[in-house]
Image (spheres, grey):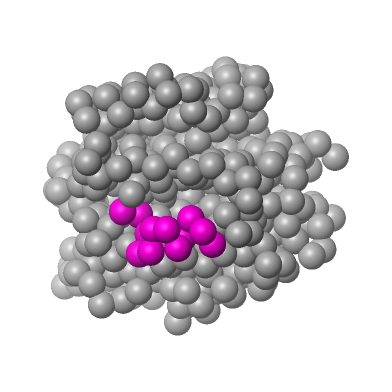
Amino acid sequence: MSLVEINFDGIVGPSHNYAGLSLGNIASASHGGDVSYPRAAALQGVAKMRGNMERGLAQGFLLPLPRPNLGLIRDLAIDASAPRQLLAAAWSASSMWTANAATVSPAPDTADGRCHLTPANLVTMAHRAQEWRHTKAQLEIAFGDRQHFAIHDAVLPTFGDEGAANHMRFCEGHGSPGVEVFVYGRQGGKFPARQHEQASRAVARLHGLDPAKCVFIEQNPEAIEAGAFHNDVVSVANERVLFTHERAFADRQGAYDAIAAAFPALQVVEVPESAVSLDEAIRSYLFNAQLLTLPTGEMALVVPTECRDSASVWAWCEQMLASNGPIRQVIPVDVKQSMANGGGPACLRLRVVADPATVDPRFMLDEMKADRIEAVIAETWPEKIDPADIGTDALAKTVIEAREALLTVLSLDTLA
């Protein structure tokens, strides 16, 4: 069996809108009420996926969840008297950020030799807490081969779990046994700490991980207050490399030492506050990037174009490339519609180490399928959504029919 890292990107849904529902997400809050452009957002996402395929990487996708969520509207009795935010929650396209879909432990790390996936419960925010059961339904189809995959229920909602956005893995190669790092926050700050330590520890036990190969680290509360609502806003890992901001962790040196004790080959590429401030790192999403191993063996960092537009961030990237370190390329991509809602390139993908032959082929992308997806988006996705449109019958009809058209062209009508 040939294990490789597959990035599963979320296709941006036809109800993509800016309702500003995510407390602690600075970009989401600052764009709340703006007009959104779902068609452009979805096409930007497909273009990012195409770029990874062109680099010779395995690429999959997950589908938009059913919106408006009529079950949520029924369960909360949402009507004209209910807060507008509850209605907007039922229309949210936030499942596009599949880094929050689940936590994934590859087969080489687990006791039973299967890849384990636990959907995130996302209980901190109402618009996201509705997702996990529909997400699990997709995961059970995409990774339905029970010889190779195990799909769990979400962790008990007493403990908030935000999935892979607070999880990192270090290894000599993606198919080798690895060390899994879980980053959690502590409550009591200006913004909610969304990842609970006990949720992380429960996931590690559910996945059958070796305790000696697990590291639990506290996120810096200053980073959370600055807008790093997930660890992947200030850190990203790939194989031997940790790419991180100086202020990412509560105990910076203690975090590095703990990871290195479990994984001695660790290489830390740290961006100092003096070069890129924490605020600028969060604004540009320098760390919410895809750190990828290319077929050549070189590592590339796929960043949002906002990084190129930032003088301090781009100067640091150029300095990093000149230093002949482990990251050899920096590739800007346009995901502006996602960025305006607080999600960069890393938010849009779930990393799964697996043999592509064991994945349901309907969820694996190729050029022909990308063409078909783009055609459906161009024909059926709304060009724009004004927040005042949310809740109207006309928009509901458009959004529902657009998603159904995509399911049909991908032969996934069972998810309708």
Q: Position of residue 26 (x, y in %)?
A: 20, 52
The answer to which of 251 and 29 lies nearer the viewer is: 251
- Going 46% across and 60% down the picture, which residue do you hit? 255
Is residue 233 placed above or below 198 in the rendered structure? above
Question: Which portion, as a residue range, is magenta?
Answer: 247-258
Residue 257 in the magenta stretch? The answer is: yes
Quarter-wise, where is residue 358 in the image?
A: top right
Q: Nearer the viewer, residue 332 or 90?
A: 332
Compared across the picture, whether 116 is left or right of 188 comes to right
Side of 67 relative to 241 (left or right): left
Q: Vertical placement of 370 versus 79: above or below?
A: above
Q: At x 25% / y 45%, what residue is drawn?
A: 273
Q: Is residue 104 visible?
A: no
Q: How many labels were placed on the picture?
A: 0
Give me the residue at 85% from left, 40% from top: 1
The stretch drawn in magenta includes residue 228: no
- List x then y, in percent, for residue 410: 61, 35
Position in image of residue 5 (x %, y %): 65, 38
On screen, residue 264 versus residue 184, left or right, reads: right
| Residue 248 image-quadrant placement | bottom left
115 over 31 or under it: above or below: below
